[in-house]
Image (spheres, rainbow, N blue to C red):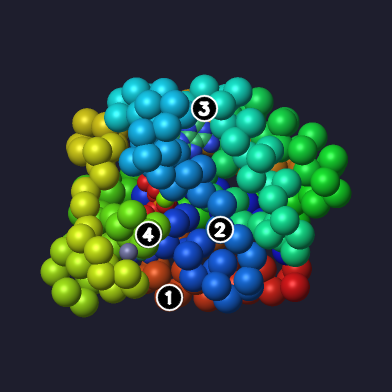
Amino acid sequence: MNIALFGPPGAGKGTQAKELSKKYSIPHISTGDILRANVRDGTELGLKAKQYMDKGELVPDEVLIGLIRNRLTGSDCETGYLLDGYPRTIPQADALTDILKEISKPLDAVINIEVSDDELVKRLSGRRSCACGESYHVMFNPPEKDGICNACGADLYQRDDDKEEVIRQRLAVYNEKTKPLINYYDDAGILVNIDGTGVVDAVFADICKVMNQFK
Ligand code: AP5
Ligand code: MG
Ligand code: ZN
């Protein structure tokens, strides 16, 4: 099953992808998580990416295209993949089409999670993240123990880009550079829109209905 989760920052891509990846046994490929891991490890890629991420800007296309090519050719993608946060520009989408053609794994669906801007700001400003990839919300999805990850027991933190002014910038960048991909994939006949405003479990059920068609 070859799926991309699409949607603005805070739509719930990461939250849903974690569970979908377990249910369908396909790797969750989050470019944001890969970049943050590089920032934490202080790699050359991380140092470069951080300058853009902290401002709410996109990391340059050539960096992301190289990264995603490496990741998709990994052996764990044999049975499929679940993309989260890639592609985010038309050049990234074009490059993805080429890579997927080379490895004969074209996308089955691009699932677009729709949430209003006001709700996105609320979600992002209350988000608490874990280095393991889990994320929580102080009100909508609190961890069992305050400030501690349910999954791994580590301390939760607030992402540097989850500050109000950076959130606004990320939404502006989404509208300008990423949103045009909705038409791009609609034209390709593989776009599916999902209402992302319900509770986490309701959104999950709706996404599963789509993914079950490709099992
Ligand atoms: P990335 O990490 O991908 O961030 P993003 O797209 O801004 O998305 P988020 O992770 O903020 O949101 P999400 O949809 O995963 O929401 P979540 O599930 O956490 O990218 C970060 C940066 O890296 C970019 O700005 C860029 O610089 C760089 N980058 C990454 N990929 C790139 C690319 N391809 N090209 C160039 N640069 C790239 O949920 C959010 C909150 O809401 C949580 O608190 C959660 O608990 C809560 N929540 C989730 N679902 C619900 C629900 N149904 N109801 C109530 N609350 C909910
Ligand atoms: Mg995410
Ligand atoms: Zn954790």
Which residue does the numbered mark 3 point to in the structure image? 177
Given this view, does label 2 or label 4 mark the residue nearer the observer? Answer: 4
Q: The C terminus appears in which quarter of the rendering?
A: bottom right
Q: Where residue 208 sits: x, y (%)?
A: 60, 72
Which badge, 3 or 4, comes first in the chain's sequence?
4
- Answer few, some or many: residues within 10 Å of disc 2's Cα (few below 14, many 20 plus, some between 14 and 19): many
Q: Is residue 100 above or below residue 178?
A: below
Amino acid at dot 4: Cys
**Helix, strand, or loop for circle 3?**
helix
Q: Where residue 86 sits: x, y (%)?
A: 57, 41
Q: Is residue 89 visible?
A: yes
Q: Where residue 213 sits: x, y (%)?
A: 74, 71
Q: Is residue 199 above or below residue 115?
A: below
Which residue does the numbered mark 4 point to in the structure image? 132
Q: Residue at x 75, y 64 (%)?
A: 79
Residues tagged 3 and 1 counted as in contact (Cβ below 8 A): no
- Looking at the rendering, which quadrant does residue 129 occupy? bottom left
Which badge, 3 or 1, comes first in the chain's sequence?
3
Ligand 3 contact, mark 4 (Cβ < 8 Å): yes
Residues tagged 2 and 3 counted as in contact (Cβ below 8 A): no
Disc 3/disc 4 C-alpha distance (Å): 28 Å
Which badge, 1 or 2, comes first in the chain's sequence?
2
**Helix, strand, or loop for circle 4?**
loop
Which badge, 4 or 1, comes first in the chain's sequence?
4
Disc 2/disc 3 C-alpha distance (Å): 23 Å
Which residue does the numbered mark 1 point to in the structure image? 201
Amino acid at dot 1: Asp
